[in-house]
Image (tube, coloured by chain):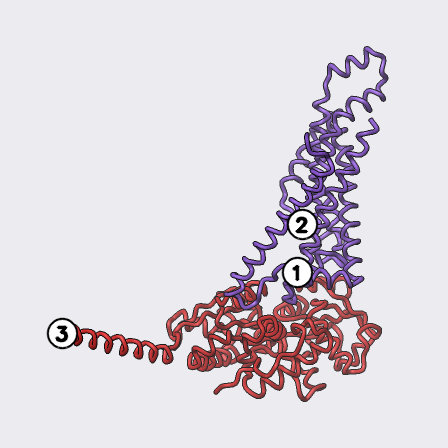
């Protein structure tokens, strides 16, 4: 490459910002025309931004951000651990796979909203978002890790045995190394889903001290700038979380 | 020849233009009203009107839409689909504020729908002290109404009672099985269902009556009819006709309960006519307009505003919120 790395990174950032500005301008134009025939205006960029600024001065809002992130992360991490475990069990114990594969498929097929309405009877509002993000991510991790394990190159394993590697080393250096890309992709995708479905659960269940609750409240008092502002914050957090997890998981690659 | 034709043409154009502008100012009023009604007690007053409109017995034509959610009505008011809508009074105030005054209240159609039920004998609000109370609507009107009535009777909602807010009206149905001594504040038609399935319980207090005891310049008015101001401006006579026909409908709901109960079931406002029959008299169906409406409603909104300004849209509506027949 003729350009050096530093330049192209700056250029990339500028291009990224230009694209965002372009779409913000489109949003403003669309709302301008739509609002001509609406009595309750759709918020434009400026109103949404001022809504965000207004929120950032309120400690309640920050508590909600933290609690929502903690709640959904809890469900997500639980799904990572249990999903991984189930994938391993499914891969090596045929009885487990026979019994639990249908459960996996069912959980994956049930729509989030149905799930929420079903578990509403047994689990309190506070925990439903954790459970929902857990149940959204679990099938993804499980399926992907199981797939990764099944794709372990058998000839590599044989060669390693011949070379005198013990089982533990084989598992670490061959099986897990092979599963890693599947796991990383599943985790990054899963986090996005966990966040979306978790916040949706918070809205439906009106979980206290949550972003979902703020969204619902904004709607119920017809303050759409708040609704848009919270949504914007939710989007930013989602992007930050995905980038964060990618960074965390990819960093450890360098140690192998 | 050419000159004559030119002259005639000019005359023709001038006449047409003046005729057109005259026609513009005396455009005929609409004969159709798009009415949106929220499913629930606030819609009962409109049922007889709706029925008559279906049969073509009304002066105006009514396109009635029954909606289950506030969101639908808000959207319909915002995009102009709804000419007239039956909504909660505080939502009416919120809409007035959020549209910058483009709607007005024509009349109040629902007084109180909240009653206090108990298996015990309770004669006054002060007897509620120390009791467990279950209700719904935290962060909404029921909570504010309850707080106002309690405080005005010298009770502190936080310390003098054990108040529990449930999420849904249907959750109130199981309260007495776990807590038979509890008092329940319920809206219609849940309150009626509760009494029907618990014959030992009775209605001990009516929030509307209790409010009347406390305040002279406000009343518990929970539902009203709003209209798009453009619609009022362009169709002043249609609005007057509507109000007359609506008042007739309200009177019919109060006097001919059997028919109205059947309509409740038919139109889907209350699932069972038997329940509706018992519920209708408790739904506070009324028709209040003009000065009395302004007094009752502005007083009520002030009480709501003092508890939570957002419940009425951030500020109290100005005088042009209240429609007055001209």
The residue identified by callout 2 is A118
Viewer can see residue B273:
no
Q: What element carries label 1?
A: helix
Of the pair B36 and B273, the residue shown nearer to us: B36
Chain identity of mark 1:
A
Q: What element carries label 2?
A: helix
- Residue B65 drawn above or below residue B233: above
Q: Position of residue B314 (x, y in %)?
A: 67, 73
Mark 1 or mark 2, earlier in chain: 1
Viewer can see residue A255:
yes
**Labels 1 & 3 near each other (Cβ < 8 A):** no
Of the pair B5 and B292, the residue shown nearer to us: B5
The residue identified by callout 3 is B1
- Residue B122 drawn above or below residue A122: below
The residue identified by callout 1 is A48
Q: Position of residue B294 (x, y in %)?
A: 59, 85
**Labels 3 & 2 near each other (Cβ < 8 A):** no
In the image: residue B13, left or right of residue A167 = left
* Badge 2 density bin: few <14, some 14–19, many ≥20, Cα 10 Å: few
Q: The red chain is which one?
A: B
- Locate residue B150: give its quadrant: bottom right
Q: Which chain is purple?
A: A
* Badge 3 density bin: few <14, some 14–19, many ≥20, Cα 10 Å: few
* Badge 1 density bin: few <14, some 14–19, many ≥20, Cα 10 Å: many
The answer for how far apart the CA atoms under marks 1 and 2 are is 35 Å
Give the residue displayed 57% in from the left and 65% down from the top: A41
């Amino acid at each position: 490459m003729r350009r050096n790395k530093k330049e192209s990174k700056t250029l990339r950032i500028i291009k990224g910002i230009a694209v965002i500005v372009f779409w913000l301008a489109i949003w403003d134009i669309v709302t301008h025309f739509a609002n001509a025939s609406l009595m309750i205006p759709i918020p434009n960029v400026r109103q949404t931004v001022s809504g965000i600024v207004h929120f950032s001065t309120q400690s309640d809002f920050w508590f909600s951000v933290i609690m929502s992130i903690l709640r959904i992360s809890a469900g997500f991490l639980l799904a990572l651990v249990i999903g991984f475990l189930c994938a391993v069990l499914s891969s090596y114990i045929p009885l487990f796979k026979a019994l639990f594969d249908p459960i996996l498929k069912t959980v994956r097929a049930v729509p989030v909203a149905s799930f929420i309405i079903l578990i509403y009877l047994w689990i309190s509002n506070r925990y439903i978002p954790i459970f929902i993000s857990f149940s959204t991510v679990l099938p993804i991790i499980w399926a992907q890790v199981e797939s990764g394990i099944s794709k372990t190159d058998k000839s590599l394993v044989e060669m390693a045995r011949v070379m005198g590697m013990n089982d533990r080393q084989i598992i670490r250096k061959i099986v897990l190394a092979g599963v890693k890309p599947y796991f990383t992709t599943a985790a990054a995708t899963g986090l996005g889903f966990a966040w979306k479905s978790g916040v949706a659960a918070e809205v439906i269940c009106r979980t206290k001290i949550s972003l979902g609750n703020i969204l619902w409240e904004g709607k119920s008092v017809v303050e759409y700038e708040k609704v848009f502002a919270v949504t914007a914050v939710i989007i930013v957090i989602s992007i930050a979380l995905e980038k964060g997890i990618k960074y965390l998981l990819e960093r450890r690659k360098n140690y192998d | 020849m050419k000159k004559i034709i030119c002259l005639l043409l000019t005359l023709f154009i001038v006449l047409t233009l003046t005729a057109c502008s005259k026609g513009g100012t005396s455009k005929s009023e609409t004969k159709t009203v798009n009415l949106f009604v929220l499913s629930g007690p606030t819609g009962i007053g409109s049922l007889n009107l709706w029925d008559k409109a279906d049969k073509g017995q009304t002066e105006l034509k009514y396109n009635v839409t029954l909606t289950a959610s506030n969101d639908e009505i808000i959207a319909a008011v915002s995009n102009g689909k709804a000419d007239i809508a039956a909504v909660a009074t505080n939502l009416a105030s919120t809409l007035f504020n959020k549209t910058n005054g483009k709607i007005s209240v024509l009349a109040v159609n629902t007084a109180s729908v909240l009653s206090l039920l108990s298996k015990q004998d309770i004669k006054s609000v002060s007897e509620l002290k120390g009791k467990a109370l279950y209700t719904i609507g935290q962060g909404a009107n029921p909570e504010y109404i309850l707080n106002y009535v309690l405080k005005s009777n010298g009770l502190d909602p936080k310390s003098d009672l054990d108040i529990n807010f449930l999420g849904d009206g249907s959750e109130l149905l199981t309260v007495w099985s776990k807590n038979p001594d509890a008092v329940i504040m319920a809206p219609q038609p849940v309150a009626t269902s509760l009494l029907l399935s618990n014959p030992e319980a009775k209605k001990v207090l009516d929030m509307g009556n209790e409010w009347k005891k406390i305040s002279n310049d406000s009343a518990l008015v929970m539902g009203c009819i709003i209209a798009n101001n453009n619609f009022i401006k362009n169709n002043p006579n249609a609005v007057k006709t509507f109000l007359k026909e609506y008042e007739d409908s309200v009177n019919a709901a109060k006097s001919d309960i059997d028919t109205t109960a059947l309509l409740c079931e038919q139109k889907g406002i209350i699932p069972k006519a038997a329940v509706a029959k018992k519920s209708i008299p408790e739904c506070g169906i009324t028709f209040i307009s003009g000065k009395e409406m302004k007094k009752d409603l502005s007083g009520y909104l002030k009480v709501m505003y003092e508890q939570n300004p957002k419940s009425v849209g951030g500020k109290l509506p100005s005088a042009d919120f209240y429609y007055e027949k001209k």
